[in-house]
């Protein structure tokens, strides 16, 4: 089974940027991918999805600030996060359809 490893999380001030990476141990070709996050005491929520053809979708809470992209040659998906807010704090998880999760990477945005 393909495994996912996220990286790029950290501590950033409000208004700053971070770029998360998710490296897959196998091919991601022909598989949709997504980023989710889970804030303390809250349910996990999707923050970005990307189809096999590169079509992207975002919830209103991050639309215009986050950008998901994929590099099928490197079996990697990225999440560029700009204009970060304290509400963006949480553990960010990479997801490969169907049913493969990464271990998560912590993002903390200070006010």
Image (cartoon, rainbow, N blue to C red):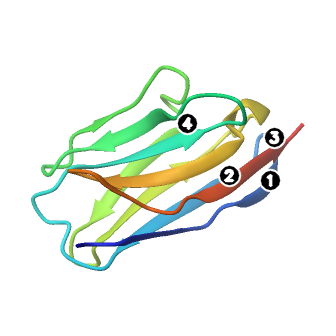
Disc 4: which residue = 65
| CA–CA distance in space, label 3 to label 2 | 9 Å
Q: Are marks 1 and 2 in contact (CB under 8 Å)?
A: yes
Q: Marks 4/2: CA distance?
A: 9 Å
Q: Give the label on residue 17, or none.
A: 2
In primary-sequence order, the first of circles 4 and 2 is: 2
| Residue at image location 13% in from the left, 65% down from the top | 29
Alpha carbon of mark 1 to alpha carbon of mark 2: how far?
Answer: 7 Å
Identify the element where label 4 is drawn.
loop
In the displayed structure, would residue 103 be above or below residue 81? below
Where is residue 63 shown, x and y percent of the image? 48, 28
Residues at discs 1 and 4 in contact (Cβ within 8 Å): no
Q: List the residue tagged with mark 3.
A: 14
Residue occupying image coordinates x 21% and y 41%: 55
Q: Which comes before the other along the chain, label 1 or label 4?
A: 1
User: Disc 1 designates what residue?
Assistant: 12
């Amino acid at each position: 089974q393909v495994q996912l490893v996220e990286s790029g999380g950290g501590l950033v001030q409000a208004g700053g940027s971070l770029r998360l990476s998710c490296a897959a141990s196998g091919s991601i070709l022909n598989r949709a991918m997504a980023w989710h996050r889970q804030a303390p005491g809250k349910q996990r929520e999707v923050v970005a999805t990307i189809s096999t053809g590169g079509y992207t979708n975002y919830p209103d809470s991050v639309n215009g600030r986050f950008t998901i992209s994929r590099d099928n040659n490197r079996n990697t998906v990225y999440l560029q996060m700009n204009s970060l807010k304290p509400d963006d704090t949480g553990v960010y998880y990479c997801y490969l359809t169907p049913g493969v999760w990464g271990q998560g990477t912590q993002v903390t945005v200070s006010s």
